[in-house]
Image (spheres, rainbow, N blue to C red):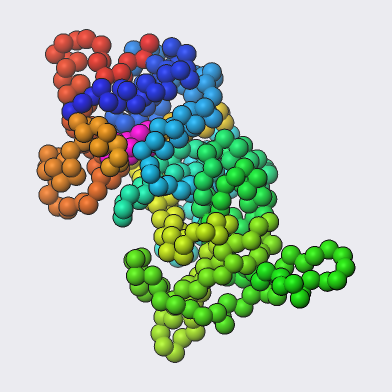
Amino acid sequence: MDTSLLDKIVYAFRDLFGSQNFALFSAYLWGLIRCEGRHTVTQIYLAGQPQSLYWSLVKFLSRGQWDHTMVVQRLLGLVLEYLPEWVYVYDHTHTIKTGTQQEGLHFFRNHRYRKRNTNQSKFHWGHQFAALGVVGLSGSLATLFPVWVKLLAPEALGASALAAFDSLVAVLPAGLIIFDRGFNNRKYFKALLAQGHQLLCRARKNAAFYYLPTPADQPPKGRHKVYGQRVDFRHWTFGRWPASLPGKKWGEVAAQIVRTRMCPQPVQLVVVRRRPKAHKPYHYFMVYTTDLALPVETILRYYQIRWSFETNMRDNKETLGFDHYQVRSERAIESSVLLCFVATSLLRLLAWPAFQQAHTTFLPSVQQGVKEMGIHWYQPAYWTLGLILRYVRQHLFSVSISQEKTAGKENPYGFAAG
């Protein structure tokens, strides 16, 4: 297994840090990857085996002189180089914490208490984050690379989230950003459109859309109308679900260019209707985008892959300890979760087809990798984050540990931190 490739990827961030901070940055990333238990700073320190003291990692997270935005931009450059087709996905996520010593704690009600989890508390505390990922598309393969995360302030959640989003879209390369229906907000859309981005968002079931005004609708004097008659999509002409997309149960599709007060520009509205039973009324699903040239099949496909953000957050929490941090300050929390995103994206990049073609000596095919790891109970179609972690730990770190024990020399793979 070519270990120099991982060192080369991490070394791409070298000019963003001083010498000591880069050693700690490398040690923290390697510790995240090597750690198989709870990903607290203590466990990461023990797994990474740095040469520095334990408190050096804590100080690196809380007081290290390095710019989060520059790290995000460098990570985006590394990822986008190998993605011929990609879109952004923006959403909020939260982590559950105990105690009151950490900054930025939110109060969350446990709405599942009376449904299933009756042994849980009716409320809990935690942190809420704004996060963005890049979904890479290659044929039927869609993989999310998490690249940016920001801790939101509980005392002014709306203002904090909008300010974080404004700072984000100003430094991103222009692209299409996918939102869930909770982000039908004109302020968000106005900010991203001003920076040259496009949006794709699901509409609420009670959202109002209007036809473009015709010349006959315009008054002879005064301000011209922007909105025409209100849309009643129940009377639209619906066609069959596109054959190129999975999910024939979705039913029929219709699309038109309309206006909405949620967005300052005209949008392409796509409506999907399906009837669960013949005697039941239709169920409607609406999604709209400011990219008026985007085909209907592509719009539906892009929104279908938005769910990869949710599954990726679950993978981060289960395998890389996104929610296991125990640091207290706001700066340290943001640093730890951002480095978790960096480690996830770099690991996912190792299994990306275009990256594999450029570097053919790192990961084998997924079938060969599963065979080498002794997994016989299922046959995955592609490399998941859990499989990549298991393969890297088994083939890379087991070799490095045995070499350290026999030779007694400094770790040759970049785990050491000055």
User: What x and y, as percent, mark residue 360?
Assistant: 21, 33
- Residue placed at 72% from the left, 68% from the top? 227
* Residue positioned most to the bottom: 279
Quarter of the image where one finds residue 361: top left
x 22%, y 52%: residue:
381
Name the quadrant of the N terminus. Answer: top left
Query: In the rendered view, would you say 48 is above or below 325?
Result: above
Residue at the (65%, 45%) spot, across then down: 194
- The magenta stretch spans residue 8: no
Q: How far across and how far down the image is residue 4, in percent?
A: 25, 22
Q: Position of residue 214 (x, y in %)?
A: 71, 72
**Which residue shows up at 56% across the image and 64% down it?**
268
On the image, which quarter does residue 345 sit in?
Answer: top left
Give whichever of 4, 28 is nearer the camera: 4
**Image position of 208 (left or right of 129):** right
Quarter of the C terminus within the rendering: top left
Q: Which residues are magenta?
A: 343-351
